[in-house]
Image (cartoon, rainbow, N blue to C red):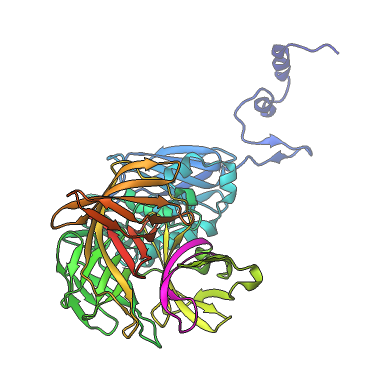
Amino acid sequence: MQTRPASSVCLAVLLIPAALVLGACGGGGSSSASSDGGTLPSPTELTLTGTAATSAAIAGKTVEAKCGSGNGSALSGATGNFRVTIGSGATLPCLLRVTTSDGTVLHSAAAGSGNSAVANITPVSELALARLSGGTPAGYFGSFDATAAAALSGTRLQTAVSAVVDTLKSVVDFSTVGDVLSGTLVAANGAVAGNPMGQALDALNIKLASSGTTLGVLTDAVARSAPNAPASGLSAIASLPANVLLNSTAANCGALRSGRYRMVANDDRSPGYATEVVTVDAATLRITNANAQAFTMTAAGTCRYTTPNGGAMAVTAAGVIISQIDSPPFRGAVFFPEQSHAVADLAGEWNGISLDRTEDNGPIQLTTQTVTFGASGRLTGGVFCDVSGCETPTASDLPNISMNVNGAGGFDVVNASDSYTDRLFAYRAGGGELMLVALAAGGHITFLTRKVASSLPAIGALSQGWGISLVPNTQPPEYTSPGAITQYKSTVTSLDATAARYARSAVFDFPNNLTRTETIAINFPRDGYLRRLPGTVIASNGTTSSVTEWVGLTLRGMGLTATGSLNNNHLGLFAAQAQ
């Protein structure tokens, strides 16, 4: 059959009743014919509303929406309110973005179903997207596609919001102001003070300013603490976690923040455990224990303190404190902000270093171990070493060790093979890395960090700070920290990539500023460990100096290194200097 030109087709339309003309020639009708002669409803538009605000309304700015299907944008009004309408066929979930006058970019999200949703865009929604994605909200928005949309449920979004509200509750309680994403938000605007949610945002802004913390730093810490944060994205650089970043700070140490701290002491307080939760008031340098007994520290330099009884304390950039406690002979202890974790957070392979007994009633000695825990908290593999060598038990010979949450904090580590129960506490720093500290009732102590192969440092890298020693004794008290706190400082001078070692110039006599060359092997005896090699060297004043051997373990992201001296069984705790 011969076809007619398009013009002829449309001329023929002139003979058709007017009601059908628009459909026949591509006009703007909103309905289409169905196969049975009726009409089909057109797809419904999707409408997103909400308020964009920091502590004040974000007015006159473009709000962009990126949805599972469809995109759109609109300008925010004078009160920060916005209404984005996305063309027919658009579907939830959606992400939203707005840029403030000072260039800060904030994001939010709406999930669920239907043709409308409310999604406020605030600093809290920015934190929620960081927690949800385990990365940067900007990166999540940029890569948001149909696959990511399919994975974004309302449950996942609300779980992330709840985690952020819980993180902020010690400084600003958002749990009492309604749903931070979909609740009614009236932001401060001119003479208008805002409703309770707006006032809470104002309080958060004040806390950010007074604590010296930026929203970007807080967002980064929240992202790295997320359960789905990739291991490759974690940082070994010591920094504070989100749950303490907004707390008040000490005048001489930005890393010392007010709040509740877990104290774990290397002390034989049998039959109990030498641990408790204390309260730190950073502004007054006052520490109050569980029995309401308090003492005030005295500043002794940047992030360094002395106690009323002459003990010493030093704080790392991650907020970990090494300390000598009680009266002489002092006990050694560590403090770190109290946190809660799930058993599943401990899954993976861990390197450890301990002061422990390898047999009942045997001598206390340095040990190392590399152990693997499953998601249920059960020990599934390990290598156990003392000064004489290592043992790798078969699966059937592994101790029957499992972990479960202890209501008083941390975990119980139950060894069904010998009926012993230890306590274990976890602390996540701002970079997302976890430190584990295990404590036996008899005072045996273990420090663990995620097993990761170390890299050689850069030439010129400086390492400095303060250290204390934990010393096992043959008579009670079994553990003490008798010596004065010591200073350390070294600079990397050369690298040997083939032998996986480096040389450093280390100060060994601070009063006379004497240095010597020391050689450090990395990933020896296993990935993640350090070994200072023994030898006799010529010091900077021309005399000979004996370098003793130790095995060390840097606790990733904590600013803390534990070293075991092989010649005397001492366990040193070295806190990198914070500011």
Q: Residue furthest right?
A: 1
* Residue 206 visible: no
User: What residue sits 49% from the left and 81% below the top?
Assistant: 421
Prevalent SS, magenta region:
strand
Please provide percent x and percent y for residue 195.
30, 60
Q: Is residue 470 above or below residue 117?
A: below
Q: Residue furthest bottom?
A: 271
* Front residue (pair 457, 254): 457
User: What residue sits 27% from the left and 80% below the top?
Assistant: 289
Q: Is residue 455 left or right of residue 309?
A: right
Please provide percent x and percent y for residue 137.
43, 46
State how many labels appear. Answer: 0
Which quarter of the figure has residue 568?
Answer: bottom left
Q: Is residue 343 left or right of residue 194?
A: right
User: What residue sits 31% from the left and 84% below the top?
Assistant: 477
Q: Which residues are magenta?
A: 348-373
Quadrant that contains the C terminus? bottom left
Please provide percent x and percent y for residue 129.
44, 51
Q: Is residue 230 left or right of residue 579?
A: right
Please provide percent x and percent y for residue 276.
34, 79
Q: Is residue 110 above or below residue 200?
A: above
Q: Is residue 18 left or right of residue 545?
A: right
* Front residue (pair 79, 469): 469
* Front residue (pair 52, 232): 232
Q: Is residue 121 above or below residue 436?
A: above
User: What residue sits 33% from the left and 41% below the top?
Assistant: 494
368 falls in the magenta region: yes
Quadrant that contains the N terminus? top right
* Residue 309 visible: yes
166 falls in the magenta region: no
